[in-house]
Image (spheres, grey):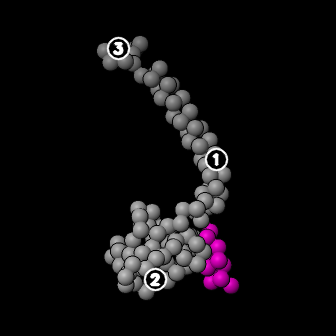
Amino acid sequence: MARSATTSDAFNAIAEGRRREILDLLAGGEQTVTYVVEALGVPQPQISKHLGVLRRVGLVSVRREGRKRMYRVNGERLKPIHDWVQHYERFWQEQLERIKRRAEAVHSRESRQTPKQGEQLENGT
């Protein structure tokens, strides 16, 4: 059951970390299987298996160039994933804004309490 879900759904396919690494490599442009194998230091059969999954769900495409197979990312097939993740971007942006406001408030309080260079505290120290 899990195998069919992995090979039919882009979300499940990218849940595997090695496949995300492969996509990262291919994001820089079309590459051969040999390049991916050498870059990741993973045996060729494993890379080919992962590329097969990514190809079946449409996240990568392949073309032959002589004896080589050239793989590239299909960006349009990543759009549903991007759209889903973007929904949560608002959450993280709000969290970062809250953190920023807190840090600025702490900094403001500390700067009011700390004497400036050359000034002395009221007790003469």
- Circles 2 and 3, Cβ within 8 Å, touching? The answer is no
Compare residues 118 and 26 and report the one nearer the observer. 26
Q: Position of residue 109 (x, y in %)?
A: 51, 25
Q: Is residue 59 above or below residue 44?
A: above
Q: Position of residue 45 (x, y in %)?
A: 43, 86
Per the picture, the main secondary structure of the magenta-coloured stretch is helix
> What's the amino acid at mark 3?
Glu
Q: Residue at x 42, y 75 (%)?
A: 70
Boundaries of the magenta span: 1-11
Q: Is residue 95 visible?
A: no
Q: Which residue is mark 3?
A: 119
Where's the N terminus, which quadrant? bottom right
Q: CA distance from mark 3 to mark 1?
A: 43 Å
Q: Residue at x 39, y 71 (%)?
A: 31
Q: Which residue is mark 1?
A: 91
* Label whose residue precedes the other's in the sequence (2 or 1): 2
Q: Is residue 30 visible?
A: yes
- Circles 2 and 1, Cβ within 8 Å, touching? The answer is no
Q: Position of residue 68 (x, y in %)?
A: 38, 81
Mark 3, other Cα within 10 Å: few <14 / some 14–19 / many ≥20: few
> Please, what secondary structure does the residue beneath circle 1 have?
helix
> Please, what secondary structure does the residue beneath circle 3 have?
loop
7 in the magenta segment: yes
Camera-near label (2 vs 3) is 2
Q: Which residue is mark 2?
A: 48
**Taking 76 as reference, is 42 left or right?**
left
> What's the amino acid at mark 2?
Ser
Number of numbered markers = 3
Q: Is residue 102 above or below residue 92?
A: above
The residue most toward the bottom is 45
